[in-house]
Image (cartoon, rainbow, N blue to C red):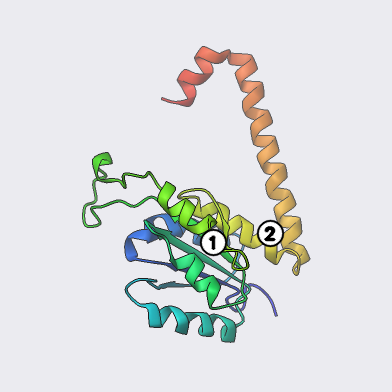
Amino acid sequence: MKYSEKPLVGIIMGSSSDSRIMQEAAQILDEYKIKHEDQIVSAHRTPARLEEYAKHAEKLGLKIIIAGAGGAAHLPGMIASHTTIPVIGVPILVYNDKHSKKIDASKFSAFGGLDSLLSITEMPSGSPVVSVGVNKAGNAGIYAIKILANEFTDLKKKLKQHKLDQYNSVMKESDKLKTEGLTKFAKNKFK
């Protein structure tokens, strides 16, 4: 079985508005040519579907589930309670105006995503969920690749190259900073 032939990662989210954040996980997986299956599964609005999805994920042979949720963020923990598949939780900063294209900072959750982060990380003993930072779905994608790299050695090589690319990028910026000086560098960097 090859990771590009059938889905090995499930990406689920509590609502369509979460897709703004969760698409970052999909982009990373797509970059590495890892097939994934994406669905909306609400822990609160479709609890029976959540249980059905857990069974579906096991039957499909998914290796990892990335679950994004905002507010009370029960989705990652609830899906983990129904399956032995590892779950990576993505806490999402809730934005209270889902129909507007323009972002208004006054409509963000009063807790700034901390509510979601704590809901995901504070699972009871024996029912763990791994969590990334608030709105860090891209990190969830990378973490999923790290798990799959234990089985697929070519992914491990690609991840090592990714780390080397990051290192080289930082070194290049550092050299430019030394050459230009901090004031000019910052001015050019953040125009």
Above or below: residue 183 compared with residue 24? above
Residue at 65% from the left image edge and 61% from the top image edge: 145
Q: Position of residue 109 (x, y in %)?
A: 31, 47
Residue at 50% from the left image edge and 58% from the top image edge: 120
Residue 36 visible in rendering: no
Residue at 71% from the left image edge and 56% from the top image edge: 158
Q: Quadrant of residue 31?
A: bottom right
111 sits left or right of 163 in the view? left
Alpha-carbon distance for marks 1 and 2? 23 Å
Residue 188 visible in rendering: yes
60 sits left or right of 96 in the view? right
122 sits left or right of 4 in the view? left
Q: Earlier in the sequence, mark 1 or mark 2?
A: 1
Find disc 2 in the rendering and name its residue.
146
Find disc 1 in the rendering and name its residue.
123
Q: Quadrant of the C terminus?
A: top left
